[in-house]
Image (cartoon, rainbow, N blue to C red):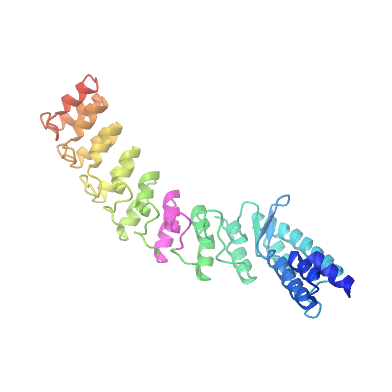
Amino acid sequence: RLFRICSVSLYAGTRSRFCLKKENWLNCRRYSTESVHEHENKYQEPFKVENHSYSFVPQVTEMDSTSGVRSFSEYENTDKEKEVRREQGLLMIDAVRRGDLKSIQDLIQNGAPVDVLSRDGFSLLNLSASPDDNDTIAEELIRAGAPLNWTTWNGSFPIHECAWKDARKVARVVLNYGQNVNSRDAANRTPLHVACMKGHSRMVTFLIHCGADVNATDNHDGTPLHLVASFGRSGVASTLITNGADPKAARFGGHTPLHDCVAKGFKYIVVELLELGVDPNVMGIAPWTPLMLAALYGHHGCLRTLLRYGAEPDIQDYNGETALHYACRMGDQISAKILVQNAARVDIQDNDGMTALHHAVIKGNQM
């Protein structure tokens, strides 16, 4: 009996050894059992197998309620089970990546786990997201118990991965099985944000048809239309605006989508937005117009386009400066010439009483 309790104590931890010193046999037995439970519980979280690019959640069997301690043979069997699950998990990950439906079905029938992660943190459903016809694979995995709500390192759900890869058939499957079309990742972006960022026009249409919020905002208050403008994705803005997207929505910093595409110099997106009826003089929260940004960054094509669609060159910002002030301060002779040719006034003074010429002289620019 003493040998048994000493063996338990060596495994169970400090509390049991303390009980032995006090010769408190009852508490020793209780703390030993609790320590074994703690030892097992810490293995219930997923962990990475570095050399196999695979992680899993091992299945912990019930303890012997009479002894509170497993035998060595039980632990040996558990290690064998873990190794089998590792190998099956590796085969499952490889089969999903290859799109091998037959191998996946065989593995599932042989008890292969579907709650596995690749080394880079992707679940099987994330890996199944592909423009290829992988919808059958995704449905097979879900029916076998693959978790829908596991996320990647950046908080992306399987529906985000579908939006990124334009996998509409897989997206339809995960949505049919309960995935939220407005799920948020770590940056608070929805799948529609992701599809707009990539410029997948068909995926954008599909997500909107499934109920995606066209005015959802991310951590920087950016809407999907902001991402279309910032990344220069043509052919998507019209779909968003016709389905209720607000072209005057201002993100962090006060920029509207028109401000964003002008700042990046995406002339074709500027034309697309203006053709859809966006006000060329929109200011949003920011105290400057898109024309001022075009003059500031020297995007001459955007400058001409805005003026052609009715942008007012003499609007003043909170400092009383016009687009001509911006061009002269930057020493941009071409922008200044374009503005003057489009009836920009050269005598407007800012809040300090300085004209555009004053700014050019102060900066040492020849205009």
Q: Is 5 situated above or below 54?
A: below
Task: Tally the marks.
Answer: 0
Residue 146 located within the stretch drawn in magenta: no
Residue 94: image x %, image y %? 69, 55
Residue 206 located within the stretch drawn in magenta: yes
Q: Which quadrant is home to the C terminus?
A: top left
Q: Residue at the spot x=77%, y=80% of the render? A: 65
Q: Is 325 situated above or below 129?
A: above
Which picture quadrant has residue 40? bottom right
Q: Which quadrant is home to the N terminus?
A: bottom right
Q: Is 219 situated above or below 2?
A: above
Q: Is 344 situated above or below 104?
A: above
The reply to whether residue 3 is in sight is yes
Which picture quadrant has residue 103? bottom right
| Region rendered in magenta | 183-211
Q: Residue at the spot x=40%, y=44% of the render? A: 231
In this rendering, position of residue 247 left or right of residue 324? right
The reply to whether residue 106 is in sight is no
Which picture quadrant has residue 246? bottom left
In this rendering, position of residue 303 left or right of residue 160? left
| Towards the viewer: 182 or 364 | 364
Residue 303: image x %, image y %? 25, 35
| Towards the viewer: 64 or 111 | 64
